Image: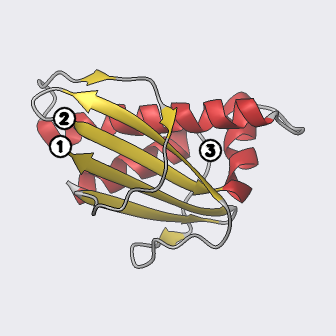
Amino acid sequence: MEQALYQASISTFEDLGLMFPIENADGSASMDGECSSVGVRFHGSFSGEIVLEVEDQILPAIASNMLGEDGPVEPQMMQDALGEMANVICGNALPAIAGKTEVFRLESPVSVERRLVAATAKAHLLFDEGKANVYIYVD
């Protein structure tokens, strides 16, 4: 599950965010500064949530790359871009975990607080722009 989540996260950041990890940062989940998190709940043969947590310093790069903007991006657009990134990671990870024939219903991305329970699987990514963590919580 962890490998599928990691691969889905990398491919989504590369394809959608035009951001390429500089190394596998699977050792440390700690963020150096302020961070933002969004979650996407899913329901199917198993249910749960995928949470994408990023350092706030990485948000402008994600939004600018996704929108093709050269200049500053409004804060709401940055949050929307982060939500879309989480949605695509979820949509890519679940078939890799459960199989391509399984059907899942995804809820809209929402801002979430840091969870105190341990994640079922996690992926830690390091970019020139900052860090990102992706967690899957299975109910």
Classify 43 as above or below 46: above
Q: Residue furthest bottom?
A: 27
Query: Along the polypeptide, which appears first: circle 1 or circle 3?
Result: 3
Q: Splitting the image into 4 quarters, where does residue 118 fall?
A: bottom left
Q: Which residue is mark 1?
A: 139
Classify 79 as above or below 21: above
Tell me the distance, in whole angstroms, between the alpha carbons under discs 1 and 3. Answer: 32 Å
Find residue 42 and report its horizontal and vertical position in percent. Answer: 28, 30
Inspect the image, locate mark 2, and give the three-letter code of the amino acid beneath it.
Ser
Helix, strand or loop at mark 3 = loop
Q: Which residue is mark 3?
A: 18
Q: Splitting the image into 4 quarters, where does residue 21 fall?
A: bottom right
Query: Along the polypeptide, which appears first: circle 2 or circle 3?
Result: 3
Tell me the distance, in whole angstroms, between the alpha carbons under discs 2 and 3. Answer: 30 Å
**Residue toward you, 47 or 92:** 47
**Residue toward you, 3 or 54:** 54
Q: Residue at x 39, y 56 (%)?
A: 115
Helix, strand or loop at mark 2 = loop
Which image quarter is the C terminus in? top left
Tell me the distance, in whole angstroms, between the alpha carbons under discs 1 and 2. Answer: 6 Å
**Image position of 112 (left or right of 44):** right
Q: Which residue is mark 2?
A: 47
Q: Residue at x 69, y 48 (%)?
A: 59
Q: Are marks 2 and 3 in contact (CB under 8 Å)?
A: no
Find residue 26 and report its horizontal and vertical position in percent. Answer: 39, 73
Inspect the image, locate mark 1, and give the three-letter code of the amino acid beneath it.
Asp
Query: Along the polypeptide, which appears first: circle 1 or circle 2?
Result: 2
Q: Residue at x 49, y 50 (%)?
A: 113
